Image: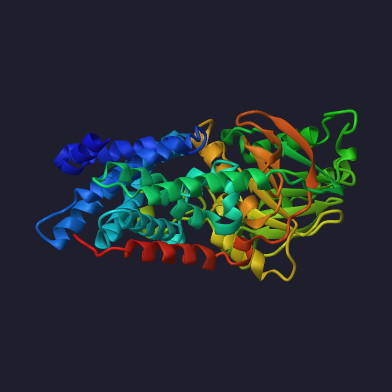
Amino acid sequence: MLLIAQRVILADSWPRRLIAFGGGAFGALALAPIGFFPAFFVPMVLAVWLIDGSGGESLWASLRRAASAGWWMGFGYFIAGLWWLGAAFLVEAERFAWALPLGVLGLPAGLAFFTALGFFLARLIWSSGAARIFALAAGLAFAEWLRGHVLTGFPWNDFGMVLGGNLVLAQAASFFGLYGLTLLSVLLFASPALFADVKPNRPFLAAAAMVMAGLAIFGWWRLQATTEEIKSAKLRIVQPNVPLDEFRADRGDELLEHYLRLSDRSTSPQTTGVADVTHLIWPESAFPFILSRDPAALAKMGSRLQNAVLFTGAARVEGDGREAEYFNAVEVIAGGDIKESYDKMHLAPFGEYMPFAYWLAQAGITQFVAIPGGFESGASSRLLTSPGLPPVFPMVCYESIFPDEIADRINSEAVRPGLMLNVTNDGWFGNTPGPYQHFAQARLRTIEQGLPMARAANTGISAIIDPLGRIIASAPVGVEAVLDGSLSRSLEPTLFSRHPRSIPMILWIFALIGAYIRPRSI
């Protein structure tokens, strides 16, 4: 190990860049769907040695070399973890295929600047011994937090998902949340780099091993708990598996009939059809028409769905003509009437709205979803209600990957919800890692908040999840399915749910203090 460390530290130019890039790419094996979390040891250990080898003739030269290594490592990590985004550009290849390199290479190149910043900040407070592990954890944790917030944020595949993707280790999210797991992931997986020191800090290494063991023991203990079932709720989730090219206005009646047939499917002697279901859930943007302006469709749903209450994704519009405003919504339908709705607040850039739309339109660049002018963001958060269910907290598509926003929305409500509802359509990405990563991140929200989740995805993964993140029922990617299941009661508010910002901040401050245990030397 000492020999490998010396070669990494002394590497220069392209060998140094390739080491960083390869290490980052290998680390992506820790993410869904593979989920081999020990793979993250490779990039984090290499990160320590690369920053060790970042010395230069001046402070600025040293910082620049560290940032360069960080950029190449981030570039490898994000290319390996996000290559599947290219599938979205091929759904309407005649319109978007030319822009595929922007998604597959351009986005990872941009995101890699956050990793570069993390290396830059770590090198700024770098020192010898175990203190430098804290410096790396503080620098990368801050950079990952920024990535989740700057320019509306994109925390997809945050380093914290290395622990958050493992159900046992993820239980720590009930205390620390995603960004706390980020700091712990860097700290724990970078620690073995100390074995290559002339005098390894064995007490620190033992402490790191004990922390990892403690996370595993805590997770195992927490998962021994049983949850109480809500007897008044019999959920049915419909996964229609409709190809995106079939979402056309001329197929609206056929799609609605497809949903209604699936909703009334017999799945067991106890559930012979929709009459034995209290609540139905359909996925995001289920209709290629405006449901609220189609009384015939609503009447048909009212007669066919009997007494079941439907939660469905749907486009919603206010106003007419040039004044029309479109919203990506969740609507609650009972007896053929729309009772309530929630409008998505955190829209996906380039998918649901176009940043710098006027200038990009001049270059022929438009958003993926063909809505005139794009969707509008919802004005405020709200809970949805239905007899037999606790208050429902709705999330549309990738709103589920933002832990801070979700915690803030929940804490702003007068009452605590008892169910998280996530409707999505990951059909853009086919059977690639994308839908698996999206599901893993959504599931982590249940652990952070201590709330169960019902998730309806057009092409998968649909699931019913308990408040400990355990999957009660699920449907895989790429199949038509109907899921029946019970709803678990929520847990008491977790520490993270009560203090979603202060807990990760306290961890970060401790890491920063740890980085100053010994005098700095650059």
> Where in the figure is residue 234, as x and y percent of width and height?
84, 43
Quarter of the image where one finds residue 465:
top right
> Where in the figure is residue 287, as x and y percent of width and height?
67, 44
Residue situated in front as seen by the camera: 370 or 510: 510
Q: Quadrant of the N terminus?
A: top left
What residue do we see at 75% from left, 33% from top?
482
- State how many labels appear: 0
What residue do we see at 15% from left, 42% from top?
12
Q: Quadrant of the C terminus?
A: bottom left
Residue situated in front as seen by the camera: 334 or 522: 522
The answer to whether 37 appears left or right of 191 in the picture is right
Quarter of the image where one finds residue 220:
top right
- Name above or below for residue 102 compared with residue 341: above
Residue 219 in view here: yes
Residue situated in front as seen by the camera: 225 or 498: 225
Residue 345 in view here: no
Q: How is the image coloured?
A: rainbow
> Where in the figure is residue 53, as x and y percent of width and height?
19, 48
Residue situated in front as seen by the camera: 500 or 108: 500
The answer to whether 31 appears left or right of 405 in the picture is left
> Where in the figure is residue 298, as x and y percent of width and height?
80, 48
- Name above or below for residue 172 compared with residue 22: below
